[in-house]
Amino acid sequence: MDKKTRILLFSGGLDSFILYHYLGKPTPLYFNLGHRYAFKEIKIIGDMVKNKLIDDVEWDFSYTLTEWELPDAHIPFRNILLAMGASRYGDTVYLGGVTDDRVSDNTRASHADMTAIISRYAGRFVEVRAPFAELNYSKFDAVKWFLKKYKRTGQAESSLLSTLSCFSPKEGRCMGCKACFRWYVALTWCGVKNVPQWRNAGLVKDYLDQVDEGKIVGERARAIRSIFTDEGD
């Protein structure tokens, strides 16, 4: 593959799917890390290719991080490792980070660190970027951009509903984990119809408590409170 290729780390989730379209369809690259929900990502990405929602994907099976995965599904250093691996394919590596991410290796500072370290040891300049984070886009902003851009096609909402973010090792969307919660809140708040029903009241309480404690603020707090309580915006 031409080393000048722009590479997008792609998971089949909301952020990377929207960023793929925002950036004018760079090459999607999927790493199978052996994590508990990898089989679902592989299936959803295959469906996206089949349904022509994305172009062909580069598949990489060189990492196995099964033993790294924590009980909450977090994989430490994941973005750093993936950016390093993606440098084999191109000189610009994009991540789907947004401003409301809480992952330490998906921040502006971490992207600058990755750019510096990978470039130094690759012997060429490799830039690691997260365009939505650079634009101060939240997940809501990303969804709103996509809906505005593609509403006229009549397929914008169904395309977003084809994405999947779920930590459960079971088939399909569990609609009860933290990844599903963020997906559900973003789509529901932005007015997408036919979003699957939420199933975990206990997790809702945890998030509402975080809103009350000021740990979640801004539009995300307003969205959670409006969707899950009788209080309006």
Image (cartoon, helix red, strand yellow):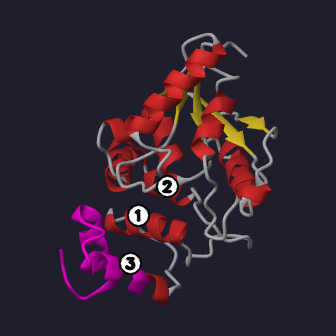
- The reply to whether discs 3 and 1 touch (Cβ–Cβ < 8 Å) is no
The disc, 2 or 3, on the residue closer to the chain's N-terminal end is: 2
| Placement of 203 over or under 155, stated as above or below | below
Disc 2 + disc 3, Cβ < 8 Å: no
* Label 3 secondary element: helix
Q: Which residue position is annotated with label 2?
A: 160
Which quarter of the rendered picture does the C terminus lie within?
Answer: bottom left
SS of the residue under disc 2:
helix
- Cα–Cα gap, marks 2 and 3: 23 Å
Using the rendered image of the protein, determine whether residue 189 is visible from the camera's viewpoint.
yes
**Over which residues does the magenta segment extend?**
204-233
Q: Image point 49% across, 43% down: which residue?
A: 96
Q: Which amino acid does label 2 sit on?
A: Leu
According to the image, label 1 marks what residue?
Answer: 187
Q: Where does the image place residue 68, in percent across and percent down from the top left?
A: 72, 56
Tell me if residue 214 is in the magenta stretch: yes
Image vertical order of residue 204 relative to residue 18, above or below = below
Mark 2 and mark 1 lie on one chain; the one further toward the N terminus is 2
| Magenta segment, prevailing SS (helix, strand or loop) | helix
> Is 66 left or right of 134, judged from the image as shown?
right
Task: Name which residue lies at 81% across and 38% down.
Answer: 62
Q: At which x and y percent is residue 110?
A: 46, 37
Q: In which quarter of the image is residue 63?
A: top right
- At which x and y percent is residue 115? 51, 25
User: How busy is the neighbourhood of tag 3: few (under 14 within 10 Å), some, or many (20 plus)?
Assistant: some
Which residue does the image show at 73% across and 70% down from the upper left? 169
Q: Name the residue under label 3.
A: 207
- Mark 2 or mark 3: which is in front? 3
